[in-house]
Image (cartoon, rainbow, N blue to C red):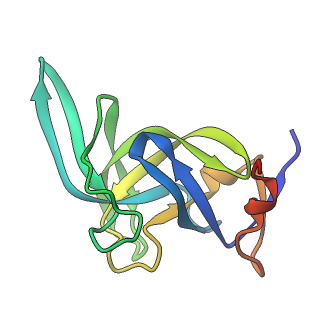
Amino acid sequence: MDQKIIGRKEKISLPKLGLNLVWAKVDTGAYTSSIHAENLEVVEENGKRILRFHPLLPGHKSYTGEMVTFEHFREKKVKNSFGHAEVRYLIETTFELAGESYSAEFTLSDRSSMRNAILLGRKILKNRFLVDVSKVNLARAYRVK
C-alpha cells in the first residue's frame, strides 16, 4: 500500500459522528487520536451500557447538536499533553481522509482549550501517511471529485 502525503492539518470526515470535512491537527508526537466530546454519559438501554456524547463544541461550525451513541467503547489511561495520566473513553469508528476510509480508535477528551477539536496521532498515521509539516490540506488532492 502506498503511503499518501498529508499536511500538518487536514480535513477529515467521521460519518458515524455526523461530521464531514472537519479540520484535524496531525500530531506525530501523540500516540493516540482524540476528538473533543461534550456531555459524556454512560447510560443503560435494553440491558446494555451505552456511551452518549456530543462531538465538538457548540460554537464549532461543524457542530450539529446531535447526540451520538456507541455500544462498543472502553476506558483507557492516557497521558495528556501536560504529561498527566487520565482515564478517557475510547471508541472505534471510521474516518475518511485522502479519498479512503479507515477504521481507527479515538479517545474522547476536553479539547476546548485547543485550536483543533480533532487530533490525529501516529497510531492512525503509521504505514498509511507521510506528513509534510510545511503544508496543510494536501489530502484534498486525493479526494474523489
Percent x, y of residue 67: 24, 47
Image quarter hosting the N terminus: top right
Q: Residue furthest right?
A: 2
Q: Is residue 134 left or right of residue 123?
A: right
Residue for point 48% across, 38% down: 93
Residue for point 77% across, 67% down: 138
Q: Is residue 43 positioned above or below 32 on the image?
A: above
Residue for point 43% across, 73% down: 81
Percent x, y of residue 45: 12, 25
Percent x, y of residue 66: 27, 49
Image quarter for residue 16? top left
Seen from the viewer's position, the closer of residues 85 and 57 is 57
Q: Is residue 102 left or right of residue 23?
A: right
Q: Is residue 94 positioned above or below 108 on the image?
A: above
Q: Residue furthest front?
A: 145
Q: Is residue 114 left or right of residue 21?
A: left
Percent x, y of residue 47: 12, 18
